[in-house]
């Protein structure tokens, strides 16, 4: 099973999504959006940019 996006709504806060790993753990949570359409645009943006390189401007190489 691949990672998946789960769409959510919170009364008074708006719409958001979470990215869930194959082990069921939430690995990313979006900002809150005013509309479901904007939320879907956010998901599309993550999909398009997920293959982005890692940048470490401080040169810390944390975790390696």
Image (cartoon, rainbow, N blue to C red):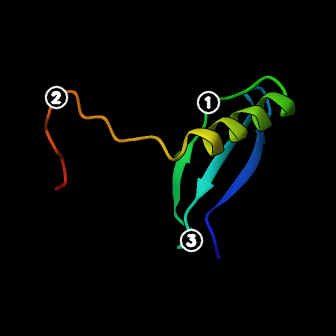
Q: Quadrant of residue 32?
A: top right
Mark positioned earlier in the residue sequence (1 or 3):
3
Question: Which residue does the numbered mark 2 point to in the structure image?
Answer: 58
Name the side, left or right, on which 55 lies relative to 36: left
Question: Which residue does the numbered mark 3 point to in the structure image?
Answer: 22
Residue drawn 30% across and 35% down? Answer: 55
- Seen in the picture, residue 5 relative to 32 is either above or below; the reply is below
Residue drawn 56% across and 71% down? Answer: 22
Q: Hey, which residue is sitting farthest bottom in the picture?
A: 1
Question: Which residue does the numbered mark 1 point to in the structure image?
Answer: 31
Across and down, in percent, residue 45 comes to 66, 35
Real-space Cα separation, disc 1 to disc 3, in angstroms: 22 Å
Q: Alpha-carbon neighbours of circle 3 within 10 Å: few (<14), some, or many (≥20)?
A: few
Q: Nearer the viewer, residue 49 or 39?
A: 49
Q: Are marks 1 and 2 in contact (CB under 8 Å)?
A: no
Question: In which quadrant is the C terminus drawn?
Answer: bottom left
- Seen in the picture, residue 38 relative to 30 is either above or below; the reply is above
Across and down, in percent, residue 8 comes to 76, 45
Across and down, in percent, residue 48 comes to 63, 41
Residue drawn 24% across and 34% down? Answer: 56
Q: In terms of secondary structure, where does tag 3 sit?
A: loop
Real-space Cα separation, disc 2 to disc 3, in angstroms: 31 Å
Residue drawn 53% across and 73% down? Answer: 23
Residue 41, label in figure: none
Q: Quadrant of residue 41?
A: top right
Q: Nearer the viewer, mark 1 or mark 2?
A: 2
Q: In terms of secondary structure, where does tag 1 sit?
A: loop
Real-space Cα separation, disc 1 to disc 2, in angstroms: 25 Å
Mark positioned earlier in the residue sequence (1 or 2):
1
Q: Nearer the viewer, residue 10 or 8?
A: 8
Q: Nearer the viewer, mark 2 or mark 3?
A: 2
């Amino acid at each position: 099973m691949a990672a998946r996006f789960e769409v959510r709504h919170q009364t008074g806060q708006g719409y958001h999504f979470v990215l869930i790993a194959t082990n069921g753990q939430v690995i990313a949570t979006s900002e809150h959006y005013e509309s479901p359409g904007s939320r879907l645009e956010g998901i599309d943006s993550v999909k398009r940019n997920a293959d982005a390189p890692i940048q470490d401007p401080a040169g810390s190489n944390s975790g390696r």
